[in-house]
Image: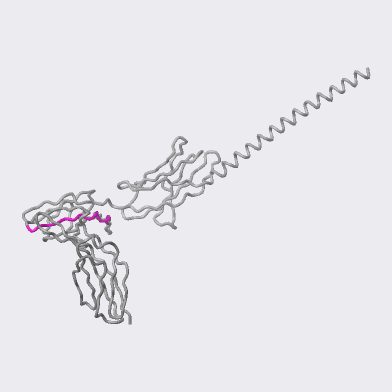
Amino acid sequence: MKHLKIGIVTAAIMVAAFFATEKKAEAALTTNNVNLKVEKAYTVSESEKTPVKWDSIMQDGDKIILQWFAKKDVSTYAIYRSTSKNGSYKKIAEVEGNAVDYICGYSDQEVTYGKTYYYKIKALNALSGKYSDYSEIAQIKMQLSVPYILRINSFKGAFNIIVGGKKYTGFEIYDGERLIGTTMEAYLVSLRKGFHKLQVRAFLDNSSTRVYSEKSPVGIFVVTGTGKIYQITPDSDPITPEIKKVKRGKTSLKLILHGSPKLYDGIRIQAEVSGKGYSKKVKMPYAKKTFKKLTPGTTYKIKLRTIKKTKIDGATIVLYSDWVTKKVKTKK
């Protein structure tokens, strides 16, 4: 019987050891699960702090379109706006999160032309109920659409300039830097013989302020002696000269230009001092010009523009580039 008792005790010990081993294994498995849960919670905690990243911000007519990359596990995105970068930001909208979408967006229609707006976003995590850090600040200025010259019609010795584009309060028409008219759609103007660089820009009277668009690209038009008007291609436009260096002497200034002189047919260089001017048309191929018999220690204003000739309607028309100006002082 002693042997039997010992066998029973031994069996009992073996069973107890087996269950102890099972409990250790279960405890180890439970511990691993806990570790996994902690690790997952830590990952979520870190990701929820990650700010929203912008995809784009753009103007679409009279509204601003905001787009950003979607984040996982987000219930809502809170959008904040200010009219100064370091000013007070006000929450203007909330956008629901969507796990399917790659890009999220919002259209801000409560905006005014001429103002600059600043935006930032934070995301509410659906699992933790906590907000992420703010995104970087994105900014954009509400601009008027740029108009354009639709066409120019001859009209009883004058020219009718037709302007296209979105209509605001009106359009301004420029010939070079000179304002020649204000209109809503068309403007009747007399243009002298020769070439004209015409541009338009839109304006909007907004309460007590006037907001302007950018000027349209330059349209180059030539009026012939017969009273006809032609638009010429941009490659006919004379290249604006570029001053590479000015070598100063006591009584002289040597002007050196960039680029090849073969790109234009001539150049007009002018130096001015105390209201008196020195002007000379220089034939190419010259890429430099020296002014002599100048006064020591005197500041001179040098102006130059290139010349290009083209034949239109059987006549030779001389085209000019914009003036380039530089102030230079002779040595004492």
**Vertical comparison of 209 with 37: above or below:** below
Residue at x 54% of width, y 46% of height: 49
When the figure is inspected, residue 80 is found, relative to residue 264, above or below; the finding is above
Magenta stretch containing residue 11, yes or no?
Answer: no
- Looking at the rendering, the stretch of residues picked out in magenta corresponds to 212-225
Location of residue 94 in the rendering, given as x and y in whole percent from the top left corner: 43, 43
Q: Nearer the viewer, residue 202 or 316?
A: 316
Can you give x and y, in whole percent of width and height, for residue 188 in the image? 12, 55
Residue at left offset 15%, top offset 57%: 310
Task: Classify 287 as above or below 85.
Answer: below
Q: Quadrant of the N terminus?
A: top right
Q: Position of residue 232 (x, y in %)?
A: 17, 53
Quarter of the image with the C terminus in it: bottom left
Magenta run includes residue 216? yes
- Give the side of residue 143 with respect to residue 80, left or right: left
Hey, which quadrant is residue 258 in on the image?
Answer: bottom left
Residue situated in front as seen by the camera: 49 or 238: 238
The location of residue 31, given as percent across then percent down, is 69, 35
